[in-house]
Amino acid sequence: MDVPRIETPRLILRAFQPDDVVPFCTEMADDDFARSITAEGRALDHGESWRRFCFLAGHWAACGFGNFVVEEKASGSFVGHVGPLHPPGWPGLEIGWAIFPRAQGRGYAPEAAAAAFRWAHEALGCNETLHMIDPENPASEKVARALGAEPGAMWTPFWPNARPVRKWTTRWAAFTGSVAYARLTG
């Protein structure tokens, strides 16, 4: 499976590579960062991070789509991951994002998520996507709003001790009128 390479004004979205394992595992060891984006609700040890890395990279082989590495064009740094996922038991296709703490606050999450949704629309025919957001994560709620998303019902994932998350929905028509789309398309 060839993972496409997508360029935005400041970012490159690309396939996961072996050299990404160490920085990924390092970032996932940050409890404040990992709390809202992992099933465990906490920092991950190296083995747990490695399994998550393999899940994200392997989603492409299993489903024909998945997350991209987010790379900063100016520095070549791996700054996060973004993209569509739809694992078994999930309520729909989700465009998720995780920008590492050292790169947060620069607008990379909405830029990357907008590029990923545009790709999912063009490549997969996706006209609607979910964003499963921990209600204690206002930064991700802000990203969802920038994409034109609307908050929906709470949903509890299927794993043991899961915390409920809010299902946000972005529809293509709302997205094309969003701030994030306007910035992406210039």
Image (cartoon, helix red, strand yellow):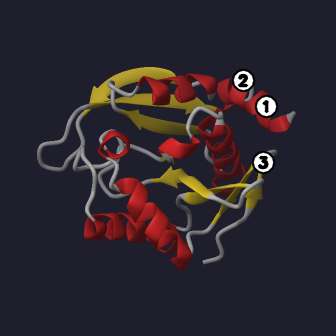
Residue 7 horizontal/vertical position (percent): 78, 54
Q: CA distance from mark 2 to mark 1?
A: 6 Å
Q: CA distance from mark 2 to mark 3?
A: 15 Å
Q: Which residue is mark 1?
A: 183
Decide: few, some or many residues near mark 2? Use Cα within 10 Å; few <14, some 14-19, many ≥20: some
In this picture, residue 43 sits left or right of residue 6 = left
Residue 14 horizontal/vertical position (percent): 66, 64
Whether residue 20 is visible here, answered yes or no, is yes
Q: Residue at x 59, y 39 (%)?
A: 109
Residue 168 horizontal/vertical position (percent): 45, 28
In this picture, residue 156 sits left or right of residue 16 = left
Decide: few, some or many residues near mark 1? Use Cα within 10 Å; few <14, some 14-19, many ≥20: few
Q: Are marks 2 and 1 in contact (CB under 8 Å)?
A: yes
In this picture, residue 59 sits left or right of residue 172 = left
Q: CA distance from mark 1 to mark 3?
A: 10 Å
Q: Amino acid at mark 3?
A: Thr
Q: Which residue is mark 2?
A: 179
Q: Which residue is mark 3?
A: 8
Q: Is residue 116 above or below residue 174?
A: below
Comes first in the chain, label 2 or label 3: 3
Comes first in the chain, label 1 or label 3: 3
Q: Amino acid at mark 1?
A: Arg
Q: Is residue 135 above or below residue 128?
A: above
Point out which mark residue 72 bears: none
Whether residue 97 is visible here, answered yes or no, is no
Is 24 in front, or is 163? 24
Q: Is residue 139 above or below residue 130?
A: above
User: In the picture, which quadrant includes the C terminus?
Assistant: top right
Q: Are marks 1 and 3 in contact (CB under 8 Å)?
A: no
Q: Residue at x 25, y 62 (%)?
A: 45
Secondary structure state at the residue bearing disc 2: helix
Residue 90 horizontal/vertical position (percent): 34, 48
